[in-house]
């Protein structure tokens, strides 16, 4: 892997920044060079949120991701805004619970994951983001439980340490999703 550029996008409250931060920490634990650049609207919940993550074998020159290799679109406005920006041959992960339309491009791989429904059905309503992250790691053949557990330990606040196993379960649901 030379470098992978990720763009996570959705609305505030979907855990967009958390998912990106997790991926960045996992990269650090896997001895990669990383950058994490969050961006969100004025409202913490309900406003737009996105974050760029770069995981690389080489130093990262700029944290800005204009043409991601991998797009995570957790709502329709995100897919509408960023679909065309994904590099040819890239991958789009879409939360099909909230996005009814199909990706219009045929030069990218697409995974439709009903993440919000799966999270709700498994009593983990706030973890649709981690269901998608589990699918990403599975597709990229990068689901290493040791580095996943260590990275989650870094990004889950101490007051929510009880959420570690639930996050791992959510990621496993995503990894197992067809």
Image (tube, rainbow, N blue to C red):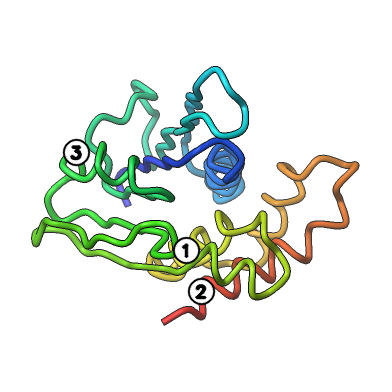
Badge 2 or badge 3: first in the primary sequence:
3
For the point 41% across and 82% down, the residue is 178
For the point 61% across and 40% down, the residue is 13
Measuring from the top left, give residue 43's x and y in whole percent. Answer: 58, 23
Callout 1–callout 2 Cβ contact below 8 Å: yes
Location of mark 3 (residue): 85
| Helix, strand or loop for disc 2 | helix
Which class describes the residues within 10 Å of circle 2: few (<14), some (14-19), or many (20+)?
Answer: many
3D distance between C-alphas at marks 2 and 3: 25 Å
Please tell me whether mark 1 or mark 2 is closer to you in this view. 2
Q: Tell me which corner region of the image, top left, top right, bottom left or bottom right, holds residue 7.
A: top left
For the point 35% across and 21% down, the residue is 62
| Helix, strand or loop for disc 3 | helix
Q: Residue 137 got which mark?
A: 1
Q: Nearer the viewer, residue 19 or 128?
A: 128
Which class describes the residues within 10 Å of circle 3: few (<14), some (14-19), or many (20+)?
Answer: some
Measuring from the top left, give residue 89's x and y in whole percent. Answer: 15, 56
| Helix, strand or loop for disc 1 | helix
Location of mark 2 (residue): 175
3D distance between C-alphas at marks 1 and 2: 7 Å
Looking at the picture, does residue 98 appear above or below residue 53? below
For the point 55% across and 51% down, the residue is 30
Q: Tell me which corner region of the image, top left, top right, bottom left or bottom right, holds residue 109.
A: bottom left
């Amino acid at each position: 892997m030379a470098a992978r550029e990720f763009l996570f996008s959705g609305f505030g409250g979907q855990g967009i920044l958390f998912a990106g931060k997790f991926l960045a920490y996992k990269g650090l634990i896997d001895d990669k060079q990383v950058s994490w650049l969050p961006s969100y609207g004025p409202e913490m919940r309900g406003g737009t949120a996105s974050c760029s993550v770069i995981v690389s074998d080489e130093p990262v020159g700029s944290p800005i991701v204009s043409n991601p290799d991998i797009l995570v679109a957790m709502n329709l406005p995100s897919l509408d805004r960023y679909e065309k920006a994904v590099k040819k041959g890239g991958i789009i992960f879409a939360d099909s619970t909230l996005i009814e339309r199909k990706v219009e491009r045929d030069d990218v791989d697409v995974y439709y994951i009903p993440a919000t429904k799966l999270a709700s059905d498994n009593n983990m309503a706030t973890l649709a983001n981690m269901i998608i992250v589990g699918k990403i790691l599975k597709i990229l053949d990068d689901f290493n439980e040791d580095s996943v557990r260590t990275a989650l330990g870094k990004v889950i606040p101490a007051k929510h340490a009880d959420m570690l196993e639930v996050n791992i379960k959510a990621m496993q649901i995503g990894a197992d999703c067809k």
